[in-house]
Image (spheres, helix red, strand yellow):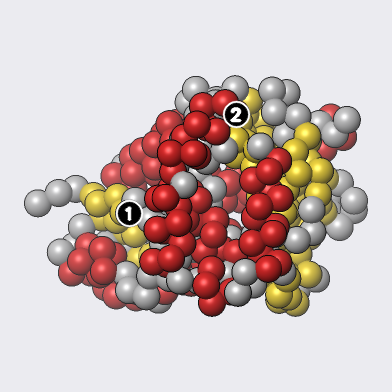
């Protein structure tokens, strides 16, 4: 009896069933989620034929990152193919959050669970496994954010854009403020057993215990979020998309609403899709989606030369 269900009950890591998606398919109800887990997203994708047969449009990883970042990447690739004269080859996702972005234990719980996973990345077409929270890079997120350190994380947009956009080299990095958070995450990744980090009960209980302290830190550092997506083509030409907002939870709300509207307006075909797939968000609907999702941003630019951002 509803038009669409939005599944936002994370963390999605370590969930071994897609109960909400299955229920939506069974009841022929349109579906979106803000999943940020690699295994969960591909488990959801396995229900594609079932959803297609039921006539159910289902859009997965449809939040801000992944989600808006996927659509930004797809548009960078489409534009590069038409203008640069080179073939898109390397895609890099860079993410920054001040504190937990106001999301509290959910963000911390997700981050801890990700520390127990090998980072899946792609290098010249080959899948490689890397250590979580390694490979530190200092990235300029533009006006209002500046340069921040980011670290390798296992995120679903890496695998999905590699497969769906045909890019041979893809990886994603994430960082936070204050810098002690990054130091703590790096320490956990290096010294805590991965089995402990993969235990959802343990990580969520720990996140809840330290939540009061986290709220204090959030009050000091703020709740900003920023994304930078770099695309390099075979001719050496690099283009960049930037997205920044002063409040992560508000921004995720706008992003989830933008995807929900797109599904309700018929931009998603029956089946289970990632946002960068044209059957997930139609190419001619991307511009409107990005405009809706970027409401209230402090910075949003697309197809800018990377040299115009780096200091």
| Disc marking residue 270 | none
The residue that appears at 79% across and 53% down in the rendered structure is 136
Residue nearest the observer in this picture, 266 or 231: 231
The reply to whether discs 1 and 2 touch (Cβ–Cβ < 8 Å) is: no
SS type, badge 2: helix
Question: Which residue is pictured at 26% across the width and 69% down the height?
Answer: 19
Query: Which residue is under mark 2?
Result: 221
- In the displayed structure, 295 sits above or below 101; it is above
* Residue matched to label 1: 9
In screen coordinates, is 216 left or right of 256? right
Task: Report x, y in % for residue 220.
Answer: 57, 26
Quick check: 67 left or right of 17?
Answer: right
Residue 163 seen by the camera: no
Q: Mark 1 or mark 2: which comes first in sequence?
A: 1
Q: Give the residue drawn at x 68%, y 48%.
A: 182
In which quarter of the view is residue 300 placed?
Answer: top right
Using the image, determine if residue 251 lies above or below residue 122: above
């Amino acid at each position: 009896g509803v038009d669409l269900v939005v599944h936002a009950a994370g963390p999605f890591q370590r969930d071994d069933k897609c109960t909400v998606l299955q229920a939506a398919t069974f009841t022929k109800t349109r579906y979106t989620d803000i999943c940020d887990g690699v295994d969960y997203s591909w488990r959801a994708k396995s229900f594609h034929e079932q959803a297609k047969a039921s006539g159910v449009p289902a859009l997965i990883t449809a939040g801000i990152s992944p989600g808006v970042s996927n659509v930004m990447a797809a548009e960078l690739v489409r534009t590069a193919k038409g203008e640069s004269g080179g073939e898109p080859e390397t895609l890099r996702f860079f993410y920054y959050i001040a504190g937990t972005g106001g999301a509290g234990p959910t963000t911390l719980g997700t981050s801890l669970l990700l520390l127990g996973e090998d980072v899946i990345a792609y290098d010249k077409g080959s899948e490689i496994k890397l250590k979580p929270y390694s490979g530190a890079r200092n990235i300029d997120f533009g006006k209002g954010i500046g340069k921040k350190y980011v670290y390798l994380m296992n995120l679903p947009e890496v695998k999905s854009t590699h497969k769906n956009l045909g890019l041979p080299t893809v990886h994603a990095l994430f960082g936070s403020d204050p810098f002690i958070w990054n130091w703590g995450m790096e320490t956990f990744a290096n010294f805590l057993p991965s089995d402990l980090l993969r235990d959802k009960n343990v990580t969520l209980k720990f996140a809840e215990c330290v939540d009061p302290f986290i709220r204090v830190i959030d009050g000091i550092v703020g709740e900003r979020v920023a994304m930078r997506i770099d695309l390099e083509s075979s001719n050496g030409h690099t283009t960049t998309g930037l997205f920044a907002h002063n409040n992560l939870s508000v921004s995720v709300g706008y992003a989830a609403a933008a995807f929900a509207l797109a599904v309700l307006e018929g931009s998603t075909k029956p089946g289970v899709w990632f946002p960068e797939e044209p059957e997930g968000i139609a190419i001619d609907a991307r511009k409107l989606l990005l405009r809706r999702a970027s409401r209230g941003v402090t910075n949003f630019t697309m197809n800018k030369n990377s040299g115009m951002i780096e200091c």
